[in-house]
Amino acid sequence: MPTSSRVVITPTSRCRFGIGRVDITPPVGIYHRFWGAASHDQATGVHRPLTATAVILQPLDAEGVSELHVLIAIDHCLFRDDDMQLLRDETARLIEVDAANITFTFSHTHSGGHICRARADQPGGEMIGPYLDGLPGEIGKAFRSACDSLRTATLSYGQTTCNMGRHRDFWDETSSQFVCGFNPDLPMELPLDVVRATAENGDALASIVNYSCHPTTLAWDNTLISPDYIGALREVVEQATDVPCVFLQGPSGDIGPRDGFVGDTEVADRNGRQVGYAALSLLESMPAPEADYRYNGPVISGATIGEWEYAAQDSERQRQTSVFRHRHWDLSLPYRTELQTVEQGERELNEFLAQEQAARENGDNDRAADQRALAERSRRLLERLQPLPPGDYPFSLDVWQMGDAFWVAVEGEPYHALQQELNCRFPQTSIIVIELANGSRCSYLPTREAYGKSLYQVDIALLTAGCLERITDELATQIECWQGERGA
């Protein structure tokens, strides 16, 4: 007969936890065009507010701010490298925390405005600089609120699935090309991870939702500032729990909403409610904090019943769940050999701009719109190429172990295979995987096999094939090392 498990642990972290949130909605009229196909330039209104949330994580035995780990979740797509560095440095100065202990992460909404100082010459672009200048002060307010709420907490973890997001590399047979859109031929079980933070007295403190799906419900027809589906997701969870809900974007380079690329905000809200209700269902299934499920033995009744009950974690389990450690390091990765130079990119941009102007003069509005979109694509390529360091690329990695769970933060936009592979290698371990950590200077990270296809994500990837697999191995090695030390 097979050996049966008699204890099912509830993945748990014990630490100090604080949370604070502020509204960071940009002004109406700011430069908003994030889509090449968009015909508008400026935001005409607000669908739902954008927020910045500061989460403080600290070991139970910590002393002083040197051991504060600050996660700042922002409702924006991403910031370009120079803007990101300015924001990080000024925020670190204001809150008096080492920048190495601050991790910015982005919800990745594509409707928050095109917030980039280099776009100051665009309609509404004059608002970008003052907006970015004010962000560190607002984040500082969220941080101070998080400090005020800092207390001993228990983090409990659960995982379910939600099929709002789908694979988005679709082969269009009619035009013989890959397009970035819903692919019904490759169903995926997308994990949805939830972390529940609870105070020592049993009060709920926060819910954290980690899900992988591009917030691209709203696209070129939308003119409103919006967090996309994340706004309704948070609303659903917060109305039921009465505590803040934090969204952390998982590896979603090849994942987008099944119903997306529209202008209707109700579709975004519907997508958000779908994820929110899945998160609530999982929260309702989670036991009381610091309790594991134990088999008590048979009970003779009309049938012989196997009795299980939740039992408080003993002192050894509490010691295990209080482990807190962090490692940050850079992994050297090679660039693609076929990357354009900045000079080539500038020439291409000027050609598209000239063709757009010629098409307008000839009254060919369709061709003008296409050339305008291609010019925007070239601008973004230049923005990616210009800040790249020479030599190999220093790819940023962070791993935290907090008790039973691991949190992983990587820059850029990895394909979902990163999370799939980590879950496959560590099936009994709760792993929170966060992309876009401190920006996306390295762009997309497709799988090795994807590089053989003419995909948007491959076309704009800056690093060579195989880098995603190296990153995955590097992270897995670190997790395995710490797990081995714990078991020794």
Image (cartoon, helix red, strand yellow):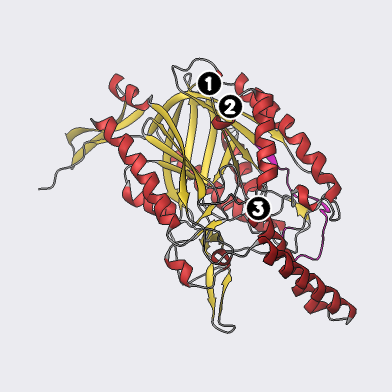
Q: Is residue 437 left or right of residue 346?
A: left
Residue 269 marker = 3
Any part of residue 289 in sight: no
SS category of the residue bearing label 3: helix
Whole-percent x, y for residue 256 in the image: 56, 60
Earlier-in-chain disc, 3 versus 1: 1
SS category of the residue bearing label 2: loop
Q: Are marks 2 and 1 in contact (CB under 8 Å)?
A: yes
Farthest left residue in view: 1
Whole-percent x, y for residue 291 in the image: 35, 28
Query: Which range is magenta?
Result: 34-52
Q: Amino acid at mark 3?
A: Asp
The residue indicated by pointer 2 is: 98
Task: Label the magenta part by its dominant secondary structure.
Answer: loop
**Which residue is pictured at 78% across the width and 68% down the height?**
350
Earlier-in-chain disc, 2 versus 1: 1
